[in-house]
Amino acid sequence: MQRLKDMAEKTKIDLSGSKEANIVLPFIAMTPNGPLNVEKSLTRAKFESLASALLERTRKPVLDALNEAKVKASELNEVLLVGGSTRMPAVEALVKLLTGKEPNRTINPDEVVAVGAAIQAGVLTGEVKDVLLLDVTPLSLGIETVGGISTPVISRNTTIPVSKSQIFSTAVDNQPAVDIHIVQGERQFVKDNKSLGNFNLSGIDPAPRGIPQIEITYSLDANGILDVSAKDLKTNKQASITIKNSEGLSEAEIKRMVEDADKYRESDLKLKETIELKNRAEMMITTLEKAGSTEEAQNMSPEQRQQGEGELNHMKTLLKEER
């Protein structure tokens, strides 16, 4: 079997430079009639036909990369090929078709990743100063909000280093503290993503839900170290956490998480919409209950009050049934 694999690799390489390759494998197996020898010729056209399904898999990653980077193919400066298999003429032709550019062949595709890693190492240590390499975060970094929803703060494929802030608030009246739960992933719910850590911000002044202004800041540096801070904008009370392994997932794990997000996107979004509707309904109920004690409400006729209370109770019943 290993001899077959080695010959297949050799044939692929030969067909990258020639339109036909000879396959010669003596004594590949023993039969009742004696040893079996393989002597065949394979054309490039036939090989590309056999490999067409694999070649087509090149299309999606290229289009996804352009889409996620928000870059048009016409805006590309250069197209570099990575990996020995990109020497195949069919791969080069497909990449040219997708990008509209002739691939740059001045760099050995077997060495591209190693060269890039060496340059990045030099940049991080300060030895290389005239090169700027832009790295990105492989998965979104978010925070847990009401209903177990994962709300992104730094989105996937954001260039790092980066710092972003968002304003959040409390979920219940007179809440004295909030728990900040940091998560990583592309799913809509915290339970389906990776938990990175959590911390508590206390000392929030008593106030109705939604009134306190809590600024959450995520700062991710070039080494993948994530600093998360929370600040009550009224009291200036602060708390923070540093997460040193925010990018500690393997490529396979990242790929699986991204694929799962695509696979379950529709069902996740439907459930998220339902939860957000429930959250808004609960806020509306709270607002209406408070409004019932105002002077204006007290001046309503008994019939109006009875109708309003009936509709309010009906809404409460519907929410209980959904839980």
Image (cartoon, rainbow, N blue to C red):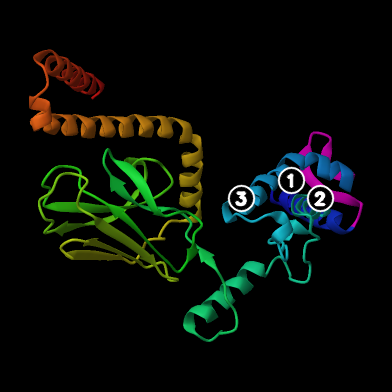
- Toward the bottom, the furthest residue is 127
Stretch in magenta = 18-43
* 221 to 98, vertically: above or below: below
Q: Earlier in the sequence, mark 3 or mark 2?
A: 3
**Mark 3 and mark 1: Cα distance apart in space:** 20 Å
Question: Label 3 belongs to which residue?
Answer: 67
Based on the picture, tell me whether residue 42 belongs to the magenta stretch: yes
Q: Earlier in the sequence, mark 2 or mark 1?
A: 1
- Mark drawn on residue 55: 1
* Label 3 vs label 2, nearer the camera: 3
93 vs 215, left or right, is: right
Question: Label 2 belongs to which residue?
Answer: 90
* 126 to 145, vertically: above or below: below
* Label 3 vs label 1, nearer the camera: 3
Within 10 Å of disc 2 (Cα), the crowding (few <14, some 14-19, many 20+) is some
Within 10 Å of disc 1 (Cα), the crowding (few <14, some 14-19, many 20+) is some
* 57 to 180, vertically: above or below: above
- Is the C-beta separation of discs 3 and 1 under 8 Å? no
- Toward the top, the furthest residue is 303
Q: How many marks?
A: 3
* Location of residue 206 in the rendering, given as x and y in whole percent from the top left corner: 10, 51
Give the image quarter of residue 248: bottom left
Q: Secondary structure at mark 1?
A: helix
Based on the picture, tell me whether residue 69 belongs to the magenta stretch: no
Q: Is residue 36 visible?
A: no
* Location of residue 252 in the rendering, given as x and y in whole percent from the top left corner: 50, 51
Q: Residue at left 13%, top 43%?
A: 173
266 vs 176, left or right, is: right
